[in-house]
């Protein structure tokens, strides 16, 4: 059986009931929620940048935020015959490339976990946090998920060597 690959990029969500479909995305501090209803044979994935827009949110940026994309994914599943009480989820992403006061990856993961609790959606696990990005492949009908960590280059890029210039003697001609 050949797979039909659909890439889910930041700000998107996809729902499918096709058993040959595999949803794929690449995550850093972003989070992807993979949610399905096994009995209805339907599942989907989203990919969000931030939990919410906070007070500084601009109109038209809703697709970047988990608060919006989680609702769209759940509603998309329900429209395809899923039942809320049968939904099960896996979460991926939310890594911390750099330490800092914003901890975007951790905030994304915490938001997604809290959303699942608030909505009564079974959280089956997944993989959040850490310091590496990852590629996710998710088969929405079966619920199978595969994670491939992205290679981390442990050696810093070469720094340009400082060039020491010796004074040059000789004639100077100015134009």
Image (cartoon, helix red, strand yellow):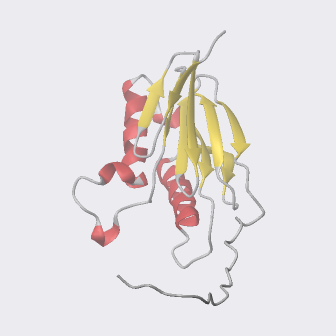
> Does residue 4 show up?
yes
Q: Is residue 47 left or right of residue 24?
A: left
Q: Residue 51: which quarter of the image? A: bottom left
- In percent of width and height, residue 145 lies at 67, 34
Q: Residue 169: which quarter of the image? A: bottom right
Residue at 68 percent across and 50 percent down: it is 127
- In percent of width and height, residue 30 lies at 52, 54
Q: Residue furthest top?
A: 1
- In percent of width and height, residue 38 lies at 59, 25
Residue at 48 percent across and 45 percent down: it is 47
Instruction: State which quarter of the image contains the C terminus.
Output: bottom left
Q: Is residue 136 above or below residue 15?
A: below
Residue at 55 percent across and 39 percent down: it is 25
Residue at 67 percent across and 80 percent down: it is 163
Q: Is residue 58 above or below residue 160?
A: above
**Viewer-side residue, 164 vs 47:** 164
> Does residue 87 show up?
no
Q: Is residue 141 above or below residue 53?
A: above
Q: Residue furthest left?
A: 59
Instruction: State which quarter of the image contains the N terminus.
Output: top right
Q: Residue 55: which quarter of the image? A: bottom left
Total marks in image: 0
Q: Residue furthest right?
A: 154
**Viewer-side residue, 66 vs 115:** 66
- In percent of width and height, residue 136 lies at 63, 39
């Amino acid at each position: 059986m050949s797979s039909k690959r659909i890439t889910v990029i930041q700000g998107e969500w996809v729902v499918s009931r096709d058993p040959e479909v595999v949803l794929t995305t690449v995550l850093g501090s972003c989070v992807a929620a993979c949610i399905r209803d096994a009995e209805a044979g339907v599942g989907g994935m989203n990919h969000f940048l931030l939990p919410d827009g906070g007070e500084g949110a601009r109109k038209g940026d809703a697709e970047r935020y988990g608060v919006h994309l989680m609702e769209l994914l759940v509603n998309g599943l329900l429209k395809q015959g899923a039942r809320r009480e049968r939904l099960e989820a896996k979460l991926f992403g939310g890594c911390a490339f750099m330490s800092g006061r914003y901890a975007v990856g951790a905030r994304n993961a915490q938001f997604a976990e809290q959303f699942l609790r608030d909505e009564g959606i079974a959280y089956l696990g997944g993989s959040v946090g850490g310091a590496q990005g990852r590629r996710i492949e998710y088969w929405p009908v079966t619920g199978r998920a595969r994670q491939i960590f992205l290679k981390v280059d442990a050696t810093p890029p070469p720094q340009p060597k400082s060039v020491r210039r010796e004074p040059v003697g000789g004639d100077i001609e100015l134009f």
